[in-house]
Every structure is written in C-alpha cells, then in structure tokens.
Image (cartoon, grey):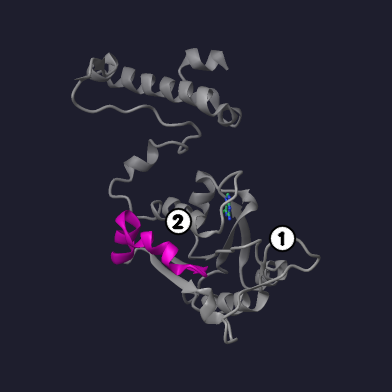
Amino acid sequence: MRIDVVSIFPEYLAPLELSLIGKARQDGLLNLNVHDLRTFTTDRHRTVDDTPYGGGAGMVMKAEPWAQALESVAAARPAGAAKPVLIVPSPAGERFNQALAYELAGEEQLVFACGRYEGIDERVIEWAEEHFTVRPVSLGDYVLNGGEVAVLAMVEAIGRLLPGVVGNPESLVEESHSDGLLEYPVYTKPSVWRDREVPAILLSGNHGKIAQWRRHEQYRRTAERRPDLLEAFDAGTLPRADRTAL
Ligand code: 6GU
C-alpha cells in the first residue's frame, strides 16, 4: 500500500517511523510519504491560509496550494492502480471505526489531507472528486487542532491490518471490535499478585469453559462500557445466559 500525507507540520508525523509501522515501512510493506503543503505555494511568504468569506473567527486554508499538492500525489499513484482514496480528517466527517479501517486497508493508495485552522476551502473537496474518492473522516465527537494526530491514529489502525505487518495474525482476531464486542480481560504470571488472584477458570485447562467465560466477559464489559455497540451485535454467538439477558 502507498500512503501520502500532506500537512503544514510534517514533523508531526515523525512517530510513523517507529514501532510496527516504522518496521512495515522498512520491510517494504508500506510506502508512506509525508509532504509539506508549503512546498506547493508560489508566493514569497509561502502562504497557506486567508480570511473566511462571510466573516467569522479564524482562517481558512487556500485552495490552490492544496490542488497543487493533491495533483502531485495523485500523479504518484502506482501504475494501473484504482482512483486513490482521499481522507480528509475532520470532526465533521463520518466516524472512523474498525470496519472502515479494514475497508481502507484494502485500497492501493490512501492520501490524507491534514487541515488546520477552520478547515480547507470547500471547493478543493468538490474538485478533488475528479482525482480521488473523497471521504471526510472523524475520530469522534471532539475537536483537535488539526488532522495530524488523527492521521497518526488512522494510519496505525489501517497499517496493522496490512498482510505481514502484525507478526501473529491471530492477535487481530481476538481483539476489541473485531467481532463487534470489546475484548475480554487478560492476565499473566504470577497467579496471585498483591492478594489478587487470576480467575480460576483460566488455570483450569478446560478450553471450552475458558472460551465461554471470555465470551461472557466480552458481553459484560460491552454492556457496561459501550451499550451502544450491543444494538448492532448478533446475539447468536453468546453464551445462553447472556443471550436471554438481551
Ligand atoms: Cl479526524 N480531525 C480533527 N481536526 N478533529 C477531530 C477529528 C479529526 N476527529 C475528531 N476530532
């Protein structure tokens, strides 16, 4: 997969050189390129923003530097690849979740346009449909100062789903959200720590009972912390006691 990130703060994306994603880049599994929006300006002051039409607080990102940057990354698309997906991080976008991470992990090229200030001139978003499938995406119902931190989160969530990035693909199967429920609690040695015991069932060696207990814990946690997730959940896979509690 190829990923291009355009930002006025390319240094913000430095953590993508670390850990699992950094390793994926070194291993050639992920071709990730960060671009400084200001290199696509033509004036002496490298201006990327201006005052909003209609008045109001703050500044708006100018259209032309964005068009130049996006044309440049669209031209870099892998030979024969489909239209790249342009992700515009914004609190006004559709919600990012594990299903969208899986969907985007199947694309050949993703481009992230990190807006700052009050956002990007809306005409860029309309114009970009010529070159991209455009998706404004939000991490949740709160406001960040710009798209960079959101891109760190999305690239990590997407990148770890690419084939070969996570060493043991089994670990993708049993984690939170992989099946619509939160994950079960986990424990390691010692079996007693500061007078607290590991649940006895986990020491029993009865794998059927352990699987049942974990499923029950997933349900209990989800009901307590994220009842909204249970509405979309197929109860057919739950232990009978949890099913009847629905
Ligand atoms: Cl994706 N971007 C920005 N700027 N703020 C956000 C967000 C994204 N998601 C939640 N708040």
Q: Residue drawn at (43%, 20%), measured in percent from left and top?
A: 216
- Residue linked to disc 1: 57
Farthest-out residue, left:
190
Crowding around mark 1 (Cα neighbors within 10 Å: few <14, some 14 to 19, many 20+) is few
Main SS, magenta residues? helix
Q: Residue drawn at (60%, 86%), measured in percent from left and top?
A: 43
What amino acid type should be assigned to the residue bearing mark 1? Answer: Ala
Q: Is residue 8 magenta?
A: yes
> Mark 1 vs ligand 1: CB under 8 Å?
no
Residue at disc 2, secondary structure = helix
Q: Is residue 36 magenta?
A: no
Residue at disc 1, secondary structure = loop
Q: Identify the magenta region.
A: 4-27
Crowding around mark 2 (Cα neighbors within 10 Å: few <14, some 14 to 19, many 20+) is some
In the rendering, at what x and y percent does residue 16 appear? 38, 60
The answer, for residue 164, to whether it is visible in the render is: no
Left or right of 141? Residue 127 is right
- Residue linked to disc 2: 152
Residue 186's label in the rendered image is none
What amino acid type should be assigned to the residue bearing mark 2? Answer: Leu
51 vs 116, nearest the viewer:
51
106 vs 222, nearest the viewer:
222
In the rendering, at what x and y percent does residue 66 appear? 61, 74
Locate the C terminus and report the quarter of the image it occupies.
top right
